Amino acid sequence: MKKSGKLIGAGVGLAAVAAAGAYFLYGERGAKNRERISGWTLRMKGEVLEKVEALKSIDREAYTELVDKVASRYAKLEKVSASELRRLTVELKNAWAHISKQLK
């Protein structure tokens, strides 16, 4: 029974990761996102997605806290502008609405 519970949890995590990735690249502003993606933004989104996958349970609070932690690391990089980081952080947090729909 424990093994099937772990498999279900992994499936939910993978569904969340897939939903978030699809939203970032193909959602409402997907075309603009694909045009504006630079190396660090792609790495940041990937890091958020990996950490989401590693969470055992996910809710809005845990997701936004995770995004804030990852964003704080990227704020220390010289090549990352504050305005672009702020925009990406807001975008990642707003993606929760889409992710939560996919989890239900």
Image: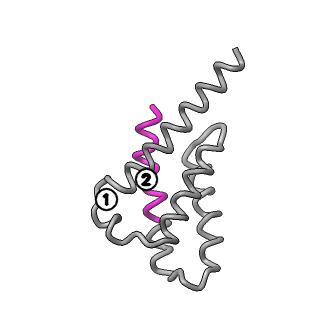
Q: Residues within 10 Å of mark 2 (few under 14, many from 20)?
A: some
Residue 66 position in % (x across, y down): 62, 56
Name the residue furthest top: 1
Residue at which label 1 appears: 30
Vertical placement of 32 versus 75: above or below? above
In front here: 70 or 7?
Answer: 7
Residue 47 in which image quadrant: bottom right
Mark closer to the chain start, 2 or 1? 1
The quadrant of the image that shows the C terminus is top left
Vertical placement of 49 versus 102: above or below? below
Q: Secondary structure at mark 1?
A: helix
Q: How many marks?
A: 2
Q: Residue at x 29, y 67 (%)?
A: 32
Tag 1: amino acid = Gly
Is residue 74 found inside the magenta-colored segment of the image?
A: no
Residue 85 position in % (x across, y down): 50, 74
Q: Residue at x 47, y 35 (%)?
A: 103
Disc 2 or disc 1, which is closer to the eye?
Answer: 1
Residue at which label 2 appears: 95
Q: Residues within 10 Å of mark 1 (few under 14, many from 20)?
A: some
Residue 94 position in % (x across, y down): 43, 56
Q: Residue at x 43, y 43 (%)?
A: 19
Residue 59 position in % (x across, y down): 57, 43
In front here: 40 or 76?
Answer: 40
